[in-house]
Image (cartoon, grey):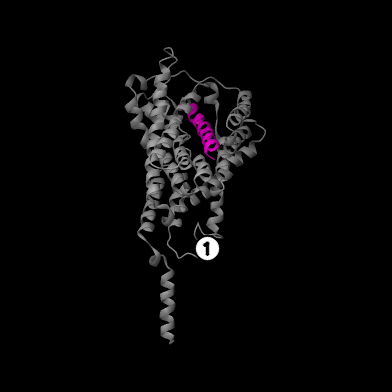
Amino acid sequence: MSFAETISENISTFLSFTGFANATSGHLIMILIGLIFLYLGIAKKWEPMLLVPIGFGILVGNIPFQPGFQIGIYEDGSVLSYLYLGVVKGFYPPLIFLGIGAMTDFSALISNPKMVLIGAAAQFGIFGAYLTATALGFNASEAGAIGIIGGADGPTAIFLSSKLAPDLMGAIAVSAYSYMALVPVIQPPIMKLLTTKKERLIRMKPPRQVSQTEKIIFPIVGLLLTTFLVPSGLPLLGMLFFGNLLKESGVTRRLANTASNALMDIVTILLGLTVGASTQATTFLTPKSVMIFGIGALSFVIATFSGVLFVKFFNLFLKEGNKINPLIGNAGVSAVPDAARVSQDVGLHYDKSNYLLMHAMGPNVSGVIGSAVAAGLLLGFLG
């Protein structure tokens, strides 16, 4: 073989390994989706902590390549596959819950315990999505994993899908995080549709002051009550309440700061990037993925409907002056604190001096607990 032929063959071999040679329409579609995620996160500032890592992860996961070089997230021995183990084995979500617990103030829920009912009502989104997925032909385990999207809790969705439907985990995780970012878009029209102007102007009594002793007792009692009821939710609930005790005990502030800042940031980066990278076109672009996104949207709608309508129903039994503004019903989903901010923003639109944020935080943090309990129930029945 001549020198020129050798050079030509080497160049041809090199070109066959490039992304240009291995690109498919699926890769290009997913790269476009990744760019949309980055645009929404950076330009629109919609949940940038979620959408930027996930969007960039989608780009990373959809760079075309020839298999066998141990670079893809689904190739044994690749760096990405090792990082993805935190998702596959489900140990990123409990660490996220540790951070959430360490940064969450449960005072609004402690001061008004009936708010837990609103958080429970919003979990109908989970079971509505479960029934829809079953009707569309998904088996029970897959439907359970898809249903948890309705809890608006990305870590919980990842944890449950890693146990019940690992093959669908990428679609479920991306769907859950996408709709969490879209809470400010999805919820307000539903809230306005279901409420009257008079209901939107309801003023609630200021929440009572909660003592430090109550704050310390709450995570201990919360752990015992929820995990005795649903032991399968222990990995999430245990870490959530442990993180909160670190915060409220007053003697482990360094640990609480680490859990809520450095550790939370590290795990969020790894989780977002690897979840995004798991959307590799060859395994992600399927009819099931499209259906999961549709069911995810429906589950958020059902959850918002359930929360708002429950407050309206509950108000029938409350005296004048004790009624709850139904605009906080949307906050029963687990998207903390975004759903509570939506309650506040919509309320201020109708009354510039009616601040609903602290009231909405009650059902919002209740939704975090509720989604973890619901995940435990589904895992107990279907796992």
Circle 1: residue type: Gln
Query: Looking at the image, which is closer to me, 134 or 233?
Result: 134
Q: Is residue 38 left or right of residue 90?
A: left
State which quadrant residue 346 falls in.
Answer: top left
Q: Residue furthest top?
A: 319
Q: Is residue 382 magenta?
A: yes
Q: Residue at x 53, y 25 (%)?
A: 109
List the residue tagged with mark 1. 70
Q: Quick one: SS at disc 1?
A: loop
Q: Quadrant of the C terminus?
A: top right
Magenta part, dominant SS: helix
Q: Quadrant of residue 121?
A: top left
At x 45%, y 34%, the residue is 126
Q: Quadrant of residue 146?
A: top left
Residue stretch rendered in magenta on the structure? 360-383
Please state the horizontal and vertical placement of residue 258, each as a whole percent of the image.
Answer: 61, 42
| Front-most of residues 234 and 113 | 234
Residue 344 horizontal side relative to residue 262, left or right = left
Q: Residue at x 56, y 51 (%)?
A: 85
Identify the residue at image location x=55%, y=41%: 96
Q: Is residue 203 visible to the viewer in this orientation of the structure?
A: no
Could you say where residue 150 lies in the image, as x and y percent from the top left?
44, 36
- Work out whether residue 146 can be spotted: yes
Q: Give coordinates of residue 75: x percent, y percent.
A: 52, 59
Residue nearest the viewer, comparing 1 with 334: 1
**Residue 147 forms part of the magenta stretch:** no
Residue 293: x and y in percent read 39, 43
